[in-house]
Amino acid sequence: YKKSLDIYESAANSLGLFSSPCLTKVELMLTCKGISDRDALSKPDPCVILKMQSHGQWMEVDRTEVIRSCVNPTYSKVFTLDFYFEEVQRLRFELYDINNSSHNGLKEADFLGSVECTLGQIISQRKLSKALLRPGGTVGKAIITITAEELTGNDDYIELSFSARKLDDKDFFSKSDPFLEIYRLNDDATLQLVYRTETVMNNLNPVWKTFKVSLNSLCSGDHERKLQVAIDFTASNGDPRNSCSLHYIHPYQPNEYLKALVAVGEICQDYDSDKMFPAFGFGAQIPPDYKVSHDFAVNFNEDNPECAGIQGVVEAYQACLPKLQLYGPTNIAPIIQKVANSASQEVHTKEAMQYFILLILTDGVITDMADTREAIVQASHLPMSVIIVGIGNADFSDMQMLDGDDGILRSPKGEPVLRDIVQFVPFRNFKHASPAALAKSVLAEVPNQVVDYYNSKGIKPKVPSEYQSSRQFGP
């Protein structure tokens, strides 16, 4: 008994527990590395749920925030627990990929694995790293690291407000989308994330929301402890050579641009007689003089921008990325006007039987909204439809007005569209859905748009010659 008591006293002294012989409060901070998504075509949106065993049952204690499209998350959420030295407190950390549409619920989330340990194990080591146990009981490559720190007993909170002015514009297609991270300098010279603000979209002079943080979390009660403040300028697409870029070409996994292109293109190409598709880009500096262009041919052949099939478009896109300097802003009116010019020429042909579908893939909020509205209103008189797929996690609320589902779109001068020709869909809504679901959503309105146009012109569809022949031998 004396030996056990000596061990207890030694442990209590090292942990600073004599201020409360049976109880102290500890904070747990989490990071993960090497998370692999069950959906191989996209990055996970990870969230960790902390559970504690009570009377043989696992009960949820708390959960972290969801970090979008990240395989190595560092969570700002801190778990605060009561630590009892004399008890075995079993913990379970469950990792989930949270679906955007599940509103943090777990019914539609993907379970990626878990780690079990005791609170005593974490505290004794201060920092505990364990491999994730995947569904089925196999050990995965992902690592969860849990760092523990004892609270000093100071429950004071500090209220902080941050703003910035004249930030550098790091975004190629619009203004920067900055957020703020505050790190505490630990005794071992490492940095610990204390707080992450919200992201202020498209703003070089952001004002972040006022927030409260405990002095324990911020500086362990030490008012002289150094802090680091860092501002993240998240470029809308990022460097295509970086794996975090929306344009990154993975050797085995298509990025979101390619997934959207193939899903929609494979449907449309069945209705194109020659299977040749002109492909254009916008918002980039292009060779040889690297001037900004908003309607350049992806194959760099302005005289013949057509690509052979959807696979040809994919190959041209992949080939052009290393030769470009992504820039901005996100102006799509020039592209709409370019296709409208082709559609206008078709109107004056004898048969006027070609219909144009423009698929626009963009991750940025449109910066030429007035010109875009004008271009769409004029295009509504022509044989064409416009499909816009929003890539990434930008705020696309302003884009919804281009889709006439909620009212009649008008030009800046007040002229209404003749007919609804625009369909807008955020790709993130279909991250966990099949390509067919995305294609069905974006193409659902096209048949009626085609019929409405030709009905308005009094043009009846031609019966294909092969169908006429088949009718001669039909019942």
Image (cartoon, rainbow, N blue to C red):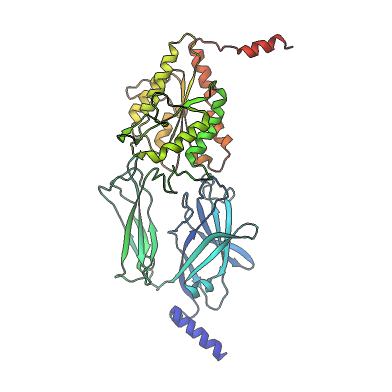
Q: Position of residue 471 (x, y in %)?
A: 69, 11
- Camera sees residue 472: yes
Residue 395, quarter of the rendered image = top left
Q: Position of residue 269 (x, y in %)?
A: 54, 26
284 versus 105 height, above or below: above
| Residue at the left extreme of this rendering | 166
219 or 291, which is in the foreground? Answer: 291
Report the residue at 42% width, 31% height from top: 299
In the shown orientation, is residue 93 left or right of residue 248? right
Q: Quadrant of the N terminus?
A: bottom right
Q: Quadrant of the C terminus?
A: top right
Residue 186, quarter of the rendered image = bottom left
How many tags in the picture? 0
285 or 388, which is in the foreground? Answer: 285
Q: Position of residue 374 (x, y in %)?
A: 35, 24
In the shown orientation, is residue 467 left or right of residue 415? right
414 versus 463 height, above or below: below
| Residue at the right extreme of this rendering | 475
71 versus 336 height, above or below: below
377 or 88, which is in the foreground? Answer: 377
Q: Position of residue 314 (x, y in %)?
A: 49, 35
- Camera sees residue 442: no
